Image (tube, rainbow, N blue to C red):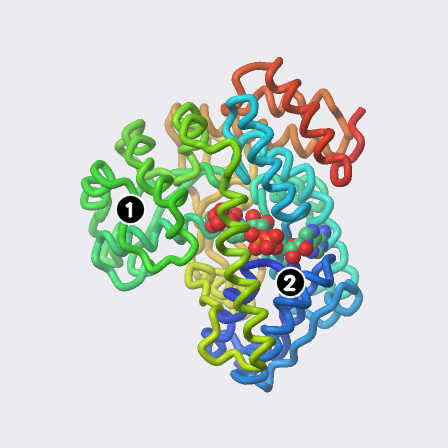
Amino acid sequence: MDKKFSIAIAGGGSTFTPGIILMLLDHMDTFPIRQIKLYDNDGERQAKIAGACEILLRERFPQVQFSYTVKPEEAFCDVDFVMAHIRVGKYRMRELDEKIPLKYNVVGQETCGPGGIAYGMRSIAGVLEILDYMEQYSPNAWMLNYSNPAAIVAEATRKLRPKAKIINICDMPIGIERSFATILGLKDRKEMICRYYGLNHFGWWTSITDQEGNDLMPVLQDYVKENGYVVNTEDFQHKDPSWKDTYRKVRDVYALDPETLPNTYLKYYLCQDYVVSHSDKNYTRANEVMDGREKQVFSAAEEIIRKGTAEDCGFHVDNHASFIVDLARAIAFNTGERMLLIVRNDGAISNFDEDAMVEIPCIVGKNGPEPLSMGKIPTFQKGLMEQQVAVEKLVVEAWAEKSYQKLWQALTLSKTVPSGEVARQLLNELIEANREFWPELK
Ligand code: NAD
Ligand code: G6P
Ligand code: MN
């Protein structure tokens, strides 16, 4: 175990970079690191975060080499893992993704509905570019991608880079499982064994047991029936009012299928009318994040640079991001850990498209993830998933073929959009807003 790893973080200027670095440092004993490099295509934004991280690393782990750059050839050479969290178009575009649909009384959300589709059309090129850089400069490296919308990005990499060493991941189930652990009075979510299936931001837990196999679902379901997933959490991100509302609303999503426990994101597909009527068309989650997390993280970074020290700094460890280290470690040391990942279905859900990218438990080792069989799924979930996966596939086809028609179909098919006509109007407005980022559609 004397190998030490070299990591590139793509999207170095992300609000999540400090939390990920702190989390990596917290796990140095089980996942030793020799080098961290930040890469971003916005050098100015990245320099603020990187300047502070440099001071923090010098104080806490001077033996770790640290650098930051906007040059791909510097960022992606000599790396074992690329951890990617880019946001193509940044919060300026997220705000439009959320606000444009709301004008049409359609859900305005970062990764779901028209906003997610618009974001997907921007992200595909950005993520493929980083994947190609990695393959060029460090052909043996793995890319652990959590750039959103992960469902569309995963479908794009499946279709357009089928052999690439990329694993797409999401922290939402981890956050929810941490709530489960709190409800159950457990110290660690890893005391539970979970069965879960779905698409990214679109799935259900079907079984939760303890290590001895005792069923923990009934206690959780009793709790969720009354409270949704609201618990007293230490979780920094999910403390904001909009997240609290999402956790509470799980109660109603759960009622639709009391046999399972739902992902919070199903709210956007199953409670669309509630979501729209409870949205402020002039102040969406993007505004909340810009006024909250972004200001907080960037002012903490400025403070560290001004003081020249990161002691008592305002950065927060991103606890639920520890699954990224678990994943890197599983590959690096062939641990065989069981993890929820976004992978090709390939029969794991036996009555679902084998070419679909699904989120299911996998055993992870040196050669990547091996999906576990989830068997047959019920008609309700299957129907919803078929509709949603078709949306995701049509978006990727639209991007690859530059097809207006397919993107119009994708929007029309989204459960969040009421009609082809609303989809067409929305599409035309999204095209205008995204000129800088989308391929020109024919
Ligand atoms: P952010 O805007 O603060 O950071 C994103 C960074 O990416 C910016 O510094 C931006 O300049 C950079 N960037 C944009 N396009 C790029 C490109 N083509 N190449 C290199 N860098 C580029 O955003 P954030 O809120 O910190 O989120 C970062 C990303 O992580 C988003 O995609 C978000 O959705 C995702 N995320 C995913 C999960 C998950 O569950 N998968 C969890 C949290 C965040
Ligand atoms: C969860 C999801 C991510 C998403 C994030 C949004 O963590 O799993 O995919 O990007 O929430 O959080 P935000 O605080 O930016 O709204
Ligand atoms: Mn996610």
Quarter of the image for residue 413 reads: top right
Left or right of residue 81: residue 240: left
Where's the C terminus, which quadrant?
A: top right
| Residue at numbered disc 1 | 230
| Image-based side of 4 in relation to 341, left or right | right
Viewer-nearest residue: 91 or 365: 91
Specify the quadrant of the image occupied by residue 38.
Answer: bottom right
Q: Which label sits on residue 96? A: none
- Which of marks 2 and 1 precedes in the sequence? 2
The amino acid type of the residue labelled 2 equals Gly
Above or below, comparing residue 336 to residue 358 in the picture: below
Query: Residue at the location (73% across, 66% down)?
Result: 76
Residue 19, position as x, y percentages in the image: 50, 65
Residue at the image position 76 percent from the left and 54 percent from the top? 132
**Is ligand 1 within 8 Å of the beta carbon of the residue shown at mark 2?**
yes
Disc 1, SS: loop
Q: Residue at x 29, y 51 (%)?
A: 180
Q: Are marks 1 and 2 in contact (CB under 8 Å)?
A: no
Quadrant location of residue 61? bottom right
Residue sitting at 27 percent across and 33 percent down? 259
| Amino acid type of the residue tagged 1 in the rendering | Val
> Mark on residue 12?
2
Give the CA separation, mark 1 to mark 2: 32 Å
